[in-house]
Amino acid sequence: MHMSDGLLNAPVSVVFLVVAAVGVGFALVKARADLDDRTAPMAGLVATFVFAVQMINFPILPGASGHLLGGALAAILVGPYVGALCVTIVLVVQALLFADGGLTALGANVTNMALIGTAAGFLVAVALRKLALRGKGGLAAVAFVSAFVNTLLAATGFVVEYAIGGAGGVEIGKVALLMWGLHALIGIGEGLITAATVTSVAAIRPDLVHLLKGGAKPLEVRS
Amino acid sequence: MRKFFIGFAFVSLLIAGVLSYFASGDPDGLDKTVEDTGIAEHAQEHPFAGSTFADYAFGGDDKFTGLAGVLGVVVVLAVSFGLFWFLRKKSDA
């Protein structure tokens, strides 16, 4: 879902560079509370895993593929703020080292995949947290739904950006229909990968799954 | 603890280094959308399109996708671990 430069006009690209900078700055400030000697290495590994899995495009239709975005996955494992930073690092490395995703488009790409996707995935996961705590099946279902919503809303980010200032003047309904249709299919893949990953981590190290620890803040233990 | 972290890193290396050869080469959802609507005609070439590892290849040769993947894993791990370790709350020593 990495857009190239030129698909959005220059002013809109700049606006979303600013949006992305503000969002990532906010995440940097808030992430501190979720990072300690155990979760910091875990967060590095989550970013690395998202990078690796993003390389694997899976077929969805003849002539079309999709890949993991990873926002919900990261948010469930390491929290929304650290998760947004994980996806951001992946996008920056992809743009700079692998020429994947444009440079002026980086703001919009970060906004869609790292900010919108992660926030959406996390909010759904937190809303369904009770179900996630019920066991492996519950956690898998929550991971799947969060990841599916994350994919659809990240795709919606592009639709909105294109509506504000996209190149070519294509009818927005057409863009939206294609984006939502294709990403509903991609979202199923995203959901399956996220559910498999999160339940695997939870089976070995449930203490490293942020969602199972109690939302954005750890539960206070009173003595 | 250490075993889990090493295992997790190894899985990422395996995915980026080996499984990446089996990835679909078809356009992803956004690329398909902009291609089918003609928006893609406005896409500009990436400023780093000619760089060594552009498009997860090595000098344009995608026989080396696995190598590019391993490099990416190492770079993302170094950058993210560095940032998160720096940001973390220090445990009281």
Image (spheres, coloured by chain):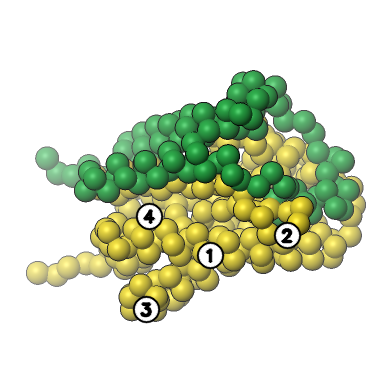
Identify the residue position indicated by label 4 in the image.
A78
Cα distance between the residues tagged 4 and 3:
18 Å
**What is the secondary structure assignment of the residue under circle 3?**
helix
- Color of chain A here? yellow
- Label 1 near label 2: C-beta < 8 Å? no
Identify the residue position indicated by label 1 in the image.
A191
Could you tell me the amino acid type at mark 4? Val
Identify the residue position indicated by label 3 in the image.
A130
**What is the secondary structure assignment of the residue under circle 4?**
helix
**What is the secondary structure assignment of the residue under circle 1?**
helix
Could you tell me the amino acid type at mark 1? Gly
Q: In the image, what residue occupies the spot 14% across and 44% down? A: B92
Q: Nearer the viewer, residue A195 or A97?
A: A195
Quick one: label 3 or label 1, which is nearer the N terminus? Answer: 3
Identify the residue position indicated by label 2 in the image.
A61
Quick one: label 3 or label 2, which is nearer the N terminus? Answer: 2
